[in-house]
Image (tube, grey):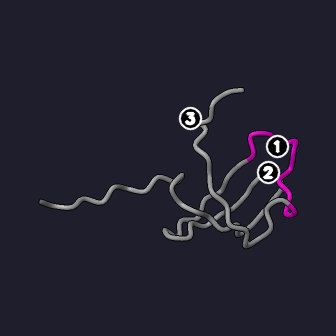
């Protein structure tokens, strides 16, 4: 029997905030080291360093699994 590793989804990883710029949030995967840039879907509402200070640990939510109200 062989063991296969299942690729990790971006939603399975924890991320650390590494930068914030107006409508962009940069995060780095704790385990993978991958750096992602998240762009706000509402650019008129800036992403705040108060909400996402550098070093904060976050997780991403899969929007396809969120139930509408």
Contact check, label 2 and label 3, Cβ < 8 Å? no
Contact check, label 1 and label 2, Cβ < 8 Å? yes
Q: In the orientation shown, which residue stands out farthest toward the bottom? A: 55
* Quadrant in the rendering for residue 28: bottom right
Q: CA distance from mark 3 to mark 1?
A: 21 Å
Question: Residue shown at 70%/66% (left/top)?
Answer: 17
Q: Which residue carries the number 3 mark?
A: 64
**Mark 1 surroundings within 10 Å by alpha-carbon count, few (fewer than 14), some (14 through 19), many (20 or more):** few
Question: Residue shown at 53%/60% (left/top)?
Answer: 13
Could you tell me residue 56's position as x and y percent?
Answer: 73, 68
First along the sequence among labels 3 and 1: 1
* Residue range highlighted in magenta: 40-50
In the image, taking residue 3 as reference, residue 27 lies left or right, namely right
In the image, taking residue 68 as reference, residue 2 lies left or right, namely left
* Quadrant in the rendering for residue 6: bottom left
Q: Which residue carries the number 2 mark?
A: 23
Q: Which residue carries the number 1 mark?
A: 43
User: Relative to 42, does residue 23 appear above or below in the rendering?
Assistant: below
Contact check, label 3 and label 1, Cβ < 8 Å? no
């Amino acid at each position: 029997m062989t063991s296969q590793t299942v690729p990790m989804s971006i939603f399975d990883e924890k991320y650390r905030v590494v930068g914030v710029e107006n409508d962009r949030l940069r995060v780095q995967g704790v385990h993978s080291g991958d750096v992602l840039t998240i762009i706000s879907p509402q650019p008129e509402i800036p992403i705040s360093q108060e909400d996402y200070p550098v070093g904060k640990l976050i997780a991403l939510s899969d929007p396809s699994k969120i139930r509408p109200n």
